Amino acid sequence: MMQTLLDQFSESIRLAGTRRRPLRIRGSGSKDFYGGTPSGEVLDASGYRGIVDYAPEELVLTARAGTLLHEIEAVLAEQGQMLPFEPPHFGPRATLGGCVAAGLSGPRRASSGAVRDFVLGVRMMNGLGESLQFGGQVMKNVAGYDVSRLMAGSLGTLGLLLEVSLKVLPKPQAEATLQFELNELQALEKMNRWAGQPFPISATCYHDHVLTLRLSGAQSAIQATHAKLGGQLMVADDEFWHGIREQTSRFFREESSLWRVSLPSTATLQLPSKQLIEWGGALRWVFTDEDGAKVRALAEQARGQATLFRSATKPKIIFHPLPKPLLQVHQRMKRAFDPQGIFNIGRMYPDF
Amino acid sequence: MKSDRLLKRLREFLPPESILSEREDLNPYESDGLTAFRQLPLVVVIPETEAQVQQVLRLCFAEAVPVVARGAGTGLSGGALPLSNGVLLSLAKFSRIEHIDPLARTARVQPGVRNLAISEAAAAFGLYYAPDPSSQIVCSIGGNVAENSGGVHCLKYGLTVNNILALRVITIEGEILEIGSAALDSTGYDLLALMTGSEGMLGVITEVTVKLLPKPERAQVLLAGFDSVEKAGAAVADIISAGIIPAGLEMMDKLAIRAAEDFVHAGYPLDVEAILLCELDGMNEEVSVEIKRVHSILQQAGATTVRTALDDAERLKFWAGRKAAFPAVGRLAPDYYCMDGTIPRKRLPQVLRRIHDYSAHFGLAVANVFHAGDGNLHPLILYDANKPGELVRAEAFGAKILELCVEVGGSITGEHGVGVEKIDQMCVQFMTQELALFHALKKSWDEQGLLNPGKAVPTLHRCAEYGAMHVHHGKAKFPNVPRF
């Protein structure tokens, strides 16, 4: 049955190529809000699902791209393991393929790494409907260009993800969350200074004069860190971090447009509006109805980039524009994967 | 292009000391760390500024002259092997650490900076650069990026690709690209991942921004001996199944142990078939607990001896044996050939058995050093290049090992790169359409194929010729025919 699906995917892609009709790759649609709305007929990738291989002692899991994220997380949890990049789902039926294609990572990103850091291999279909395999199920692999990691965050514009192999990690033995009352500058200073010391910090969040810090590791290390740093121990902290990851916490309930600003962890962002800081200072969530050009200019002043994450209407520019030489490289690479230009046109940048 | 004319044009923007064209000056550049392959370049250029690199590339682009970039020349796969009709572009003079930001924990460095020099410069702030290839005293960070170098701490701290933030890259057309940034992520495709490990095929790196990590409060190492390789392999799985990610987890087999012990007197047991070195690091309290846990796991796994390094001096001694394994094995025979395959860890006993079968078949001894945590196997094949036919046999033996790695679901190279050395085995690991995509990707950066041509990705024609005995994605064409 899975082979039949693959044949159907290939057939749809080839047909779309001959007719020059774009395709819109979609899993469950949990991240439809993110990026532009691509033109074309929907290619439903959700049926190609199932965990193909999972060897806990090898720290590797391979699953088809349509597999539900929560299904994968449940299987990992049974073995005391986890997806180290703590991906946001943004919906109950979020798929592995969508997670990798969107390239979004959660609170643990600054300490553990991003989606791309844990992608070991992919099987994908290019714009000619050919099934290709890159990387593998091993931790180290430098044979050929790193196409697997390139797929992470490419928003389906380079091809249809079929199967992904991920490095997984053991869950920490213990976790605890501490809170500190600080102003923004103090919080930024603390987050950066503490990250430069061997504390087991696994997530940070600053909003409304409170710095929240999660520690993960051996109980003894957490206790020693708490003793050194002080702070108030938080109860129900799993809920707190879930609310940040899934954007269900109160901060995210707002009418205006939500911007995602990625910047150096020590930078300050001169934008007088509601903000929430994550990733030790390197990620800012900002609600503002300011003009996009102005938000981007302020992000650039802070040596960062701004992406319009959620908004009522979708303007033409969503992701931070690329300088011309980089844009040209992107366009040529897009053609290498998708010569007819059929995959997710307009999802990332207006013409691809 | 005639070399006279090329030299004349180069002299227009490079000082005389930055251009080498006399044979005796070219000789040191004839190979990298893989000395079995040698070739003199047309000319060596050693620019000092980014503008000069840009001019060299523009000239080569305009005149269709191939360019091979070279860092410290320590690569083990011939990635920096010169071309007789090409320019060898040495980045040796790009040796400045430009900026260390202790608060943001980043270092901006030129590509010719030595790997270890970054950690040395960051040490004053309690920080270090994590990837530590064995050649870290001499190898350069630019070369590390080009090869996506690893080291003995990869399982916990990742490879080069996981530890860099930004690159400045010049394309063959002379265009300067800023890839990545001082932030954790950037919009667009992940070109940082694409450039890492691209073996100088897509652009020339002129600056690297790396992440720095806090030095662990404490590191402690355990040494365990086993009477079989199977038991040592099972112990590795037990440690990881217990939820422990060691900072380093290395295995050596009997021949490697003996060679290392004779060479550096590391204190390894000699009456065992395999040893495991397991390093744990982190906060003092955490290490204390985990050392005890690992100690009992190793004993339960049937270790015949388990020792915890008493102090830092002994810890470094244990590691000295492992880090000196290559030169130590080098003392056992006039020459050795170092392989670099990766395998799913559970296949280790099977793979080692097959390697020993091959060893008997080819009549060449082999010592095995294994990054056990991440499945990266370094068989060292012993031979004597002066004995007729031994080099050819060693290469054939090596090719069999790499094909075996692919057959069990691994890769032909974990950290040394493809270069010229493993180019034929790329035909085994990848199908025609996959190789075609690599070529298309290369073209999207370098239309004329002037950057390091002939390396890393074989032509389809070459693969067709190599395809006599093909093993593909684990499926041999004639699986029932006995081989060796």
Image: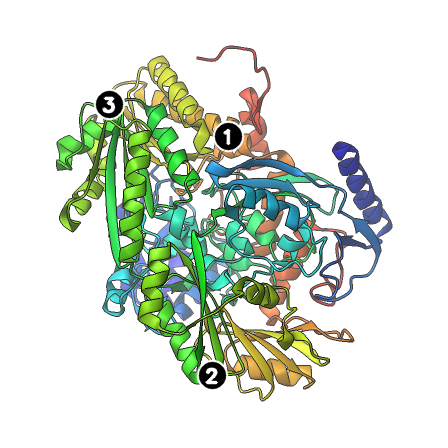
Dot 2: element: helix
Instruction: Please state the chain letter of the residue tagged with numbered disc 2 in the rendered image.
Output: A
In the image shown, does B50 or A316 lie closer to the viewer?
A: A316
Instruction: Please state the chain letter of the residue tagged with numbered disc 3 in the rendered image.
Output: B
User: In this orientation, does residue B292 appear?
Assistant: yes
Q: Is residue A15 left or right of residue A127?
A: right
Q: Residue at x 49, y 31 (%)?
A: B425
Say whether disc 1 or disc 3 marks the residue closer to the N-terminus.
3
Dot 1: element: helix
Amino acid at dot 2 = Glu
Mark 2 against mark 3, which lies toward the viewer?
Answer: 2
Please give the residue where the numbered disc 1 appears in the rendered image.
B406
Q: Residues within 10 Å of mark 2 (few under 14, many from 20)?
A: some
Please give the residue where the numbered disc 3 appears in the rendered image.
B386
Q: Position of residue A133 (x, y in %)?
A: 61, 39
In the image shown, does B105 or B199 lie closer to the viewer?
A: B105
Q: Is residue B45 left or right of residue B261?
A: right
Please give the residue where the numbered disc 2 appears in the rendered image.
A184
Q: Residues within 10 Å of mark 1 (few under 14, many from 20)?
A: many
Residues tagged by mark 2 and mark 1 found on one chain of the structure: no
